[in-house]
Image: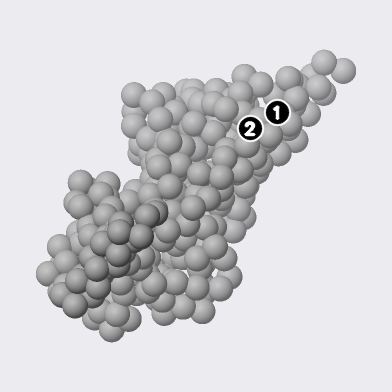
Amino acid sequence: MNPIRRNLVGLALAALALMGLPAHAALQITDDAGVVVHFERSPQRIVSLLPSLAETVCELGQCARLVGVDRYSNFPDSLKKLPQVGGGLDPNIEVIVALRPDVVLMATSSRAAERLRALGLKVVALEPKTHADVQRVMIKIGQLLEVPDAQRVWRTIDAAVMAAAQSIPASARGTRVYFEVNPGPYAAGESSFIGETLIRLGAKNIVPGSLGPFPKLNPEYIVRADPDLIMIGQRSVDGMAQRPGWMGMRAMREQRLCVFSTEESDALVRPGPRMAEGARLMARCLTEKAAAKKAGARS
């Protein structure tokens, strides 16, 4: 830069300082609700009302910026020590305000955004639902936190999902899977991020995308579909054998059933940075239950 231009830049910065304006570029984020949120600098105090968003902040190495989380955020362990501010749908507004956050991260489905904005708080609504959403949200949070390598973090997660898919033997591919998200029963359909993972693992989902990402099913639908393999969480498994017609399904008769612990279920059903761990859990299930069964049938 030549001396004249350097002096002009210096004078401009000095003028901004005298006017009380920031000398650095403002930060602007457009959230999933289409709201444009302006920041004078990257937020240092963050409240998260969605577990996947809190996990993303931590995955980007910025856990220390979180000052409050919703009641379901429990990973990594350090989040358990933070003040809880209720749930995503029923947050404790007073507690959130008292934490003096620079930004509140929340789902677009939460109704609390307008109340928080009316109180002068900045809100960024982000809600990942697909693999592409997880990537987009991670990059957007990276921009918000000024973390330059968010794309690299995503590539690592995506590569781990691919590695899980490559670990599955050919004998397990094409297995017809029913994945229950929670009692209802609510299932993970083809269009959900869980369904997308199953597709990448070479499995066939008995719940088509036309029913939506997480449809509530008539239990008889599952009986008629007669899946080869059932994936279900510990929270849902109690009373499953008493569901009408379920013991007649092949997966139940032949014990082709994977029951995930509460901790494993959290990793599986949250569309965030632990998506690769979820893929590994499903790959292990397919390998141990589906592949082993087919091998036994041939012997």
Q: Secondary structure at mark 2?
A: helix
Does the image show residue 37? yes
Residue 268 on image: x %, y %: 54, 47
Q: Is residue 32 above or below residue 50?
A: above
Say which residue appears at 44% left-offset and 43% top-offset: 134
Spatial separation of the CA atoms under disc 1 and disc 2: 6 Å
Say which residue appears at 68% left-offset and 34% top-offset: 163
Q: Is residue 16 above or below residue 212?
A: below
Location of mark 2 (residue): 162
Q: Which mark is residue 166?
A: 1
Amino acid at pointer 2:
Met
Residue 231 on image: x %, y %: 58, 39
Q: Is residue 117 left or right of residue 125?
A: left
Residue 135 occupies quadrant: top left
Q: Is residue 30 or residue 117 the one in the foreground?
A: 30
Q: Secondary structure at mark 1?
A: helix
Mark 1: few, some, or many residues within 10 Å (few <14, many ≥20)?
some
Residue lying at the far left of the rendered structure: 118
